[in-house]
Image: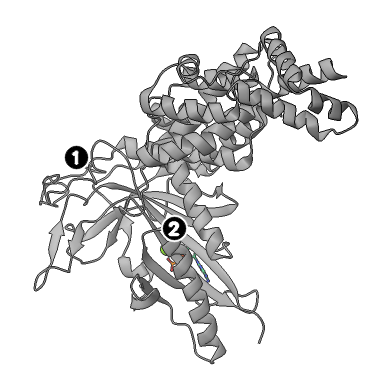
Amino acid sequence: MGEYKATIGLEVHAELKTRTKMFCDSINDPEEKTPNVNICPVCMAHPGTLPVINKEAVKHVLKVGLSVGGTLADFTEFDRKNYFYPDIPKGYQISQYKYPLVSGGVLNGVKLTRIHLEEDTARSSHDKGEYSLVDFNRAGIPLMELVTEPVVKTAEEASAFARELQLLLRTLGASDANMEKGEMRVEANISVSTTEKFGTKVEVKNLNSFRTVERAIAYEVDRQSKALERGEKVIQETRGWDEGKQATFSQRLKEESHDYRYFPDPDLPKLKISELKELSEVNLRKGLPELPWEKRVRLIREFGIKPESAEMFIQDEQMGIFFETVARSLGSKASNWKPCFQDTGFSLAENYITSDLAGFMKESGSLGNVIAENFSGIIQMLIDNKISSRGAKEILLVMYQQGGSPEGIADTRGLLQKSDEGELTEIVKKILDDHKNIVMEYKQGKTASLQFLVGQIMKVTKGSANPQLVKSILLKILD
Ligand code: ADP
Ligand code: MG
């Protein structure tokens, strides 16, 4: 039998950041710890109450759609997805079926089917003993659902897609998309086949980290391939992920969409998006920030930095803003500045931020007492040979802990390199006088003697001399 090829399609849910819930004015606060405080008759499904569409949520989804190049719906409506479970007080979830807000689009090379809007369900806990508990704070929080085409081939591709989506949602301010907190939830549909024809798919739910997404997919590909190898059939079902066992387990047989008896919700108006001015494509486009993939290209082109550094600046917004502020201030100092590769200032700033400063930031999550202006000062002093790289590291540490200007710190700590040619020449002459035999050896061809003389000068200046300058003065006098 041939190799089993995996086919994966993803369904991702993300809780949207809005002030209030999807269809009522209860507060949308996923962080609320006290159960059942952000609730009202609408999200508790009291008879006679009516839902009202939250425009902010619609806007978030449309912006995501625009960012991924999807087609925004002009006409859209909400449907009732009927099922019975205590986490859904109405007996149905308001979702979108036939007319999603967004169709198509591509993210991280993966084709999207659709993006629609629905409401989140209540949170139920079944681990309390003889009874179950339901917290309705989450019921009715706006939830975006994004569905991909079955085009993903590997577990790594799937988690890379989820990471890029998380970054996009954060960049747009649409969702905090924290997987551990359940703000972003990934479901993976997985099938294997030896031919071009897709095999039977299995849906795996409850994947609450990128690592779990990868492991669950790898596990399923392996399980399904082995089952087929044994001559068994793959059953279409929904499976969960057991973190302890690092394995998927069967939860229930998959329901078909006709089981849900979808139909347009008669309590909600149909939306004609083009008639809502603030949701027009032109206005939405104006409100789009620079997107992660645009920023990647720009940072590399504008500052000539390494792709890994650009990635760090994109993932950590604070660090990214800091780098750009520093880079711009360095750039504007040079009169002939234009965006170019191999600019010493940019690459020095890049290196000190992604190594030293990133190390400090990892501990505290902040820039400490470092401000961009002072940091640029360190870079400028390095360029001007006023400090050594060792000195720069020491200044940065002091600056992070206590603050202060680079000149001030360098001065009090004796880190300024002597770059005054006249002053250094005097020192060099004295050293040469003291080591006449070494000078002789050098003149007879022992080139290693030069390094010894440089070392002597560094010693008497306590390392404060600029070594390049010392060397050039020495050569000038000796040759
Ligand atoms: P269902 O009607 O069972 O929900 P959909 O057609 O809506 O199925 O697809 C749900 C998800 O499953 C989508 O992400 C889709 O790309 C993916 N999918 C569909 N068929 C397969 C398959 N054979 N293997 C893997 N994923 C699939
Ligand atoms: Mg489906």
- The three-letter code of the residue at mark 1 reads Ile
Q: Can residue 370 be seen in this view?
A: yes
In the rendered image, residue 463, in percent from the top left (x then y), is placed at 60, 25
Most extreme residue toward the bottom, as rendered?
A: 231
Viewer-proximal residue among 328 and 11: 328
Residue type at numbered disc 2? Phe
Quadrant of the snapshot with the C terminus: top right
Nearer the observer: mark 2 or 1; the answer is 2
Q: Residue at x 37, y 47 (%)?
A: 177
Q: Which colour scheme is used?
A: one colour
What residue is shown with label 1?
A: 27
Circle 2 sits on which residue?
210
Residue 154 lies in what quarter of the image?
Answer: bottom right
Judge by depth and name the residue closer to the eye, 314 or 18. 314
* Picture residue at 57% right of the left edge, 39% below the top: 309
Q: In which quarter of the image is residue 277?
A: top left
Q: How crowded is mark 2: few (under 14 residues within 10 Å), some or many (20 or more)?
A: many
- Image x and y of residue 297, in percent: 63, 36
Secondary element at image label 2: helix
Q: Is residue 266 left or right of residue 469?
A: left
Residue drawn where x is 69% and y is 18% of the image: 338
Label 1 SS: loop
Is the residue 44 above or below the residue 358 in the image? below
> Outermost residue, right direction?
444
